[in-house]
Amino acid sequence: MAGNTFGQLFRITTFGESHGEAIGVIVDGCPAQVDIDLDFIQAELDKRKPGQSKITTQRKEADTVKILSGTFEGKTTGTPIAMIIPNEDQRSKDYGHNVDVFRPSHADYTYFTKYGIRDHRGGGRSSARETAARVAAGALAKLFLKTQGIEIAAHVSSVGKLNAPAVTIDDVESFIARRESNIVRCADAATAETMIEFIDEVRKDGDTVGGKVSCYVKNCPVGLGEPVFDKLHADLGKAMLSINAVHGFEFGSGFAGSEMRGSQHNDIFIAPSASNTGVKTATNFSGGIQGGISNGMPIEFKVAFKPVATIMHNQETINSKGEAAEISGKGRHDPCVVPRAVPIVEAMAALVLADHVLRNRAAKV
Amino acid sequence: MAGNTFGQLFRITTFGESHGEAIGVIVDGCPAQVDIDLDFIQAELDKRKPGQSKITTQRKEADTVKILSGTFEGKTTGTPIAMIIPNEDQRSKDYGHNVDVFRPSHADYTYFTKYGIRDHRGGGRSSARETAARVAAGALAKLFLKTQGIEIAAHVSSVGKLNAPAVTIDDVESFIARRESNIVRCADAATAETMIEFIDEVRKDGDTVGGKVSCYVKNCPVGLGEPVFDKLHADLGKAMLSINAVHGFEFGSGFAGSEMRGSQHNDIFIAPSASNTGVKTATNFSGGIQGGISNGMPIEFKVAFKPVATIMHNQETINSKGEAAEISGKGRHDPCVVPRAVPIVEAMAALVLADHVLRNRAAKV
Amino acid sequence: MAGNTFGQLFRITTFGESHGEAIGVIVDGCPAQVDIDLDFIQAELDKRKPGQSKITTQRKEADTVKILSGTFEGKTTGTPIAMIIPNEDQRSKDYGHNVDVFRPSHADYTYFTKYGIRDHRGGGRSSARETAARVAAGALAKLFLKTQGIEIAAHVSSVGKLNAPAVTIDDVESFIARRESNIVRCADAATAETMIEFIDEVRKDGDTVGGKVSCYVKNCPVGLGEPVFDKLHADLGKAMLSINAVHGFEFGSGFAGSEMRGSQHNDIFIAPSASNTGVKTATNFSGGIQGGISNGMPIEFKVAFKPVATIMHNQETINSKGEAAEISGKGRHDPCVVPRAVPIVEAMAALVLADHVLRNRAAKV
Amino acid sequence: MAGNTFGQLFRITTFGESHGEAIGVIVDGCPAQVDIDLDFIQAELDKRKPGQSKITTQRKEADTVKILSGTFEGKTTGTPIAMIIPNEDQRSKDYGHNVDVFRPSHADYTYFTKYGIRDHRGGGRSSARETAARVAAGALAKLFLKTQGIEIAAHVSSVGKLNAPAVTIDDVESFIARRESNIVRCADAATAETMIEFIDEVRKDGDTVGGKVSCYVKNCPVGLGEPVFDKLHADLGKAMLSINAVHGFEFGSGFAGSEMRGSQHNDIFIAPSASNTGVKTATNFSGGIQGGISNGMPIEFKVAFKPVATIMHNQETINSKGEAAEISGKGRHDPCVVPRAVPIVEAMAALVLADHVLRNRAAKV
């Protein structure tokens, strides 16, 4: 209930602060007999780690993951899988100047008021560093989903007001290759270039900017999602909104759909035929989910990230006594969070889907 | 796990199909000693009930709620409160023509495939009728929140492309009075008039249209919300996305925030002063929530509803054998769901807040 | 969290007070396509209902169950199944004399102190009347377990110091027939007779007496139960201890096992052979459960019930102001609870097993 | 749902196998501002660790605990507290001879059948080594309970057929001192001596023997426990039954109570007086719990442990192909588990109480 657990049957519990000994996660409920590919898990973490390019924070952390339990001879055993990632580059002194000051649009004030105590170093528990544990767990979820044929791919679809053109994903592997060919993780090469230039400019201003990540799930079977509260998109939405800096979630037609008419918006079913194995729909405004349950079409959703709150400007604020104070911009932070958010969005999606694959096993006698 | 339960400490479980005996809800975890105001609960339901105006479905259901347990001499006792709403106007025959046909953009196909069986009458469990149970439970949550001073108010902020001007809510009571003065439930009288005309026109076309509901929470104490997965806005998001026809959720700056720079977006803290009791922020792009925890500012979020899928046109589709079929538009349905969605959005918000008020009691020794 | 829900995947939530409108239950997570046999459900309730013989309370309640949702054309649909049992014989006036007095060894004092309010009529929520809802839900669980071949049978193995000889159950149907042939529900006819005489004598004294129920599960597949906290016997134990008046639980060798040596107690595995399909053990001190997981042998456990607290004698006590008071013995109560507890024990066992059958589906890829 | 989590608000999730890298636990929901006493936590672990006396296994493990997160400047911060205990003395080779053979009355066969794979080294996840993580978490729970004035004390009340006389605990500290003055952890010195001799004799026979642990909770406030499924004793029962080798649980009058009459068994309330602050009962057959809720009297329960399954004799068994096989008795094991079980019983009791203290905060407005 203290909120550090996510999922029902495929369930993770994360721990760790930005500047503590280590962060980590226990994955409980991963079925037995999943092949463990530690290189894959590490590669996923590497996409999230700091210091990977000029448009991310220059902090350096290897973020090397270690599995402590739950596997035997390269396979999962059905018992809890604990993974830890030691904290290495803990320049706590970078934070010394802010010990008693609440950073604007950070969680300092709310944590301090809620708990009456706070670990001020680097945001403590509220640091986005916690998401590394999610990525490790999500990588495990992907390995499980692979046994079910389900694939997930996300990319940066906008930075500030720069939007990538709409994509369709035929082949997940090549889509990811396209995305990984540039440091902003946008599958459209031309847009990627503009985005990178823009972020670099923002960074030089000592400022930050928001963006959006779009995510796609392919080969999802019909039937995932539970009525009425645990609709597949409701669980995806919660998963995404739990990521640091996320301010919005939409799936299928999303906010734009609220401006449409039913006669435009309805996805007409197409019967299976020689050229069409399985039921399809002519359009996909439903985003692959109807009545909260996957319908076999690609699942599509979008996640909006606000600009990072830490900027290199001085700002007015208050201290823990409630007095006016000033905060100076120091430390090493991301000018735009979305390139590193891509693996986090995928990880959370993988966790939701793995959970619902297992939950769906209880649907029928 | 089958998904019909929402909340952790203030927890509801709903039951019932559109055309069964009754729908209802058990509220478990409502603290003892809340004054029960049955008239208030019924009044909330009346805002959701069908047939209330020319721009809602013409089905007639009294939706009279009955409390079966959990109260004694006008107060809650701490034990589960069961409420039922009998189904009255069950014209199952209206649905006879669609027994074996999957309605486009409904849950017919997904339910049938998931469970291998479905109650085809009026959508069965996937019918928005289920939300009446949520409104009853939400009314109870509001009675509890009243003991904490927390108030909630929503209104229709857009219908199709018609948008109401931004509102600020000083007084919740008068805001709700303004909203209730028109049948579309928009607090801006001029916009309301245009919206009503537009919906009426859409209805005459046999078509439907989407819209948005904006919701505000006043007097929320600092500290509600749990790191890291059960952030207050993540739980609000899940709650909203679990409502039928919702395709998007945003809070604070939302999707627009993803286009902003940090230097614009940061909410600067203002120290308490003679004219300002308590910590405030100069702006509220955070939407009253920082790091997933309420910061004492008004909570603000927006919910996007797709157009209702049932239209009065004939549409191509498939049947349960996967063969091409046609569906005719019959029955009595809403041309636009948002006027009736306002009390549902408020109810779900109330349930999330009630839950987090109780959860927050465990934060400190 | 308020404790009125039991189970994870096959989950029930009960509601209702002794003297309210109705009691009932929502079963959430019962798989789709279970054949509903309403007569069977009612027959199970009839075994628990008051007034069925001279050795039970003389209160009369038909305890007629009504299904409100979740079934369609005689089958479950995968959606929540709500069942209610109206309260009929509500002689609240019988309780008028005890409004302000705490009955010894009842829950009056603890409920009043916990909640600051209590429904004094017949024990309110703490009344064993709540278990009728469990029996209805358990009957549904049995119908699901039938599809898996799992059978459950319990009987009264002792009343006071009168103990039935040990039983082995080859055929569940005939065992239940033997048990049902007498009003005390003991499968051993000779012991049953002595027990009935003894209870009748106790009843005439205006007194009550405790007893034990033994329960057996046949054809349980290997693999039910989850390490490490949700061991099958731990969930069975919790289920039984949650029944009113239960003071002890043991399985397999139980308390006696704590006096044995390992060399006696170990259950030696026997390889499958011509005369022995499947792995067996030579003895069954493990009670069908090893490491918390069913091993395919019959599951065996025993439940101890204290004597009913309501006696027909005057007793000293205190009132809600904490002052000394006297309580007189009135009302209509059971001299011994175990004959009516048999269907309750079976119901709770069925709920635990149904839950673990579904949970076990997530064990492997 | 995979069963490695215990508790609702004060919640633990354990991980780790007997012969993996490490075992550990995440404690989620421990309130902020609890003083962390690492020496106390380690001292609790030392009571459980192997090799502590001649009547425990001669394996040597330091069982040194390390806190990875959730504390700051000596206090809890409200965020998850991860603790790990590295595995040191992993003589996996001791188990090489049993790779493919199922040990009688162990969990080898059930785990292998459930998951299709098993870590055969030392019982893997089913090893009682997992309970070290519980003891660490329980120590934290005790530190929290200390802030509430609640104290817990257990001791060995029987070994085989040797029973200690009944105890009353006036002062928890001196009771624990008495218990710790001997290696069998029985508070009665004379019985302790006989027990030690007996266990030593059993050990020399290469055999094992069962026993019982009795546990007492002092200064528990009225009101802990939730109707109807999460009765305090039901949660205590589940907690105890989840400990390795436990076959029975009883509280208050327990199994003996089932032989009593109501007129003997009822605990008569005594009004507060000059010599008696607060409500008391004349007897305590209820074991401090009425209607599932603590009544302010001492809580008393007893836990029965079967004899350890690993004996130094050769035994017939089967292998993973279902063929007859023989198992030889090697390795280093406990002749009697109860002396080391005392801290485990206390830890689980502390976890249940901590959880219910927090849950009870939601009882009233």
Image: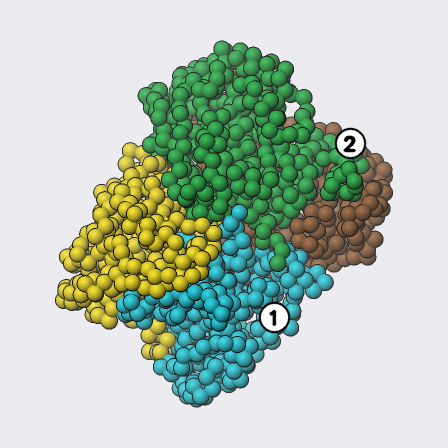
Chain colours: A brown, B green, C yellow, D cyan
Q: Mark 2 highlights which residue?
A: A194
In front here: B256 or C88?
Answer: C88
Task: Answer left or right for B323 relative to C216.
Answer: right
Q: Which mark is residue D41?
A: 1
Label 2 SS: helix
Q: Are marks 2 and 1 in one subunit?
A: no
Q: Amino acid at mark 1?
A: Ile
Question: What percent of the width, then of the height, locates residue B129?
Answer: 43, 29
Rendering coords of residue D169 (x, y %) = 48, 76
Disc 2 vs disc 1: Cβ atoms closer than 8 Å? Answer: no
Pointer 2 local density, CA inside 10 Å: few below 14, some 14–19, many at least 20: some
- The answer to whether residue B1 of the structure is visible from this angle is no
Q: Which of B4 and D358 lies nearest the eye of the viewer?
A: D358
Tag 1's secondary structure?
helix
Q: Could you say which quadrant of the image residue A299 lies in?
A: top right
The chain letter under disc 1 is: D
Residue drawn 35% across the image and 26% down it: B88
Rendered view: B93 above or below B246: above
Q: Is residue A262 above or below residue B10?
A: above
Chain to which the residue tagged by mark 2 belongs? A
Confirm whether residue B38 shows in the render.
yes
